[in-house]
Amino acid sequence: MRTAYSVETVRAAERALMARLPEGALMQRAAAGLAAACAELLGRVYGSRVVLLVGSGDNGGDALYAGARLARRGAGVTAVPTAPGRVHAGGLDALRRAGGTVAAADAAEGLIARADLVVDGIVGIGGKGGLRPDAERLAAAVARSRAAVVAVDLPSGVDADTGEVRGAALRADLTVTFGTYKPALLVDPARELAGVVRLVDIGLEPPPADARLESPQHADVARLLPAPAAESDKYRRGVVGIAAGSARYPGAAVLAVSGALRGGAGAVRYVGPAGDAVLARFPETLVSDAGPARAGRVQAWVTGPGAGDDAANVAEVLAADVPVLLDADGLRLADRDAVRRRDAPTLMTPHAGEAAALLGVRREEVEASRLAAVRELAAVYRATVLLKGSTTLVAGPGGGPVRMNPTGTPWLATAGSGDVLSGLAGSLLAAGLDALDAGSVAAYLHGLAGRFAAGGTAGSGAPVGAHDVASHIPRAWRDVRGGTR
């Protein structure tokens, strides 16, 4: 599990570690890791041109000491202080002794235009509200250049705790972060600016209980996947009910069932007007037209995909004493007080537009503050919330670390993909996973299946349909079971 911590927690852990180390040792550890990452990115250090954008904080000191190491290997290193007179004195002295130089800000644009590498040490993890005008001009020059960009700890201009970008910010190809991840490196929109993230171990030991964000890996998901035992039958493995679809949107029901059949439960019951379409595609489905309350026993319900204006089925499902997943039209039709009153777990799966409607804000506000939005929704509805999007987040109603899904591909932004996810997560609920784990595991498998279907990673591949994603869930499941990442 990758974990991210708040600025306050990171600083407390740094203070505790520095109290046990010789003065300056922690910065030297960070600088050594930063220099190694820069050298690897450059490939050939000797003769390369490196520009350090140096602020007044410790990130600027890290950049200076790393620059000194590169200068000793034959790089031409120039530091550009963004706050002259407030630069880390020890780092500046080390750079000069190694043969590096210092330039005024008015020479920066020309230096950046000729650079092979720019190191962003402008703002530390405590920065808020975007770059100041002088630093914004430097960031614009970097954006125009062909230099590779390495950010120190995180890109300047982003909020470390929230991932928000409230003004101009610098975009990096590589971010070298120290000791632990910061939430901004895992959550959009800041995550998009960080490029590849490299974690350097400097001996930091923040308390695990203080984690603000978690990102599951293969091994974490593998431990949660349900598996049948020798004595299992279809009912012991769990039955998931799907109350979805309408005469106008029968495909939503078919896609939700397709996800549910591949989610670990032993059987799928379908209730709704799309029974014929579901049976034509999946004859193993148990179809009923009697309504959710009379469809037979289930261990979890999924309701909402393609439901149109059928509020009756949604209300009936919410009255059940089993876990319920609310998606799509179900989010719009559900009574908020009915959701809040439920004793059994509820998992809500909105995208940014649906989340905005539930919170009464603009979609852009949700997309700019995804971490705050998912936490607020979970608290307001007393439910577990899976917020879909470029960064899929899962938050529980009781607080604690938010889960961030690391898999996926932009090709998943296709009609019906969310219906498959809903069925998959509902099946995991029926198989016995709690709502936070069911949402996290479903998002992970769904994202991995999307990659396999598209035939590439997040930045490559080809268009896929939702049915392609569903058909690749078993492959994703086997991949998770077969190894760790």
Image (tube, rainbow, N blue to C red):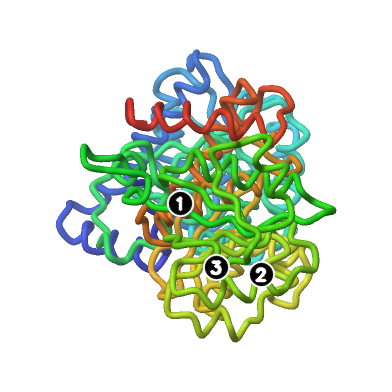
Name which residue lies at 46% across and 34% down: 67
The disc labelled 1 sits on which kind of residue? Answer: Ser
Residue in front for this viewpoint, 367 or 252: 252
Position in image of residue 384 (x %, y %): 49, 67
Name which residue lies at 58% across and 55% down: 242
- Closer mark to the observer between disc 2 and disc 3: 3
Whether residue 131 is visible, yes or no, is no
Q: Is 82 situated left or right of 13 in this image? A: right
Position in image of residue 109 (x %, y %): 74, 37
Q: CA distance from mark 2 to mark 3?
A: 11 Å
- Closer mark to the observer between disc 1 and disc 3: 3
Q: Is 22 situated left or right of 166 in this image? A: left
Q: CA distance from mark 2 to mark 1?
A: 26 Å
Q: Is 451 situated left or right of 461 in this image? A: left
Q: Farthest residue in the right direction?
A: 248
Height in image: 379 above or below 198? below
Label 2 secondary element: helix
**How many marks overall?**
3
Name which residue lies at 38% across and 52% down: 238
Q: Residues within 10 Å of mark 1 (few under 14, many from 20)?
A: many
- Quadrant showing the C terminus: top left
Pick whichever of labels 2 and 1 is earlier in the sequence.
2
Quadrant in the rendering for residue 92: top left
- Tag shown at residue 294: 3
The disc labelled 2 sits on which kind of residue? Answer: Asn
Q: Residues within 10 Å of mark 2 (few under 14, many from 20)?
A: many
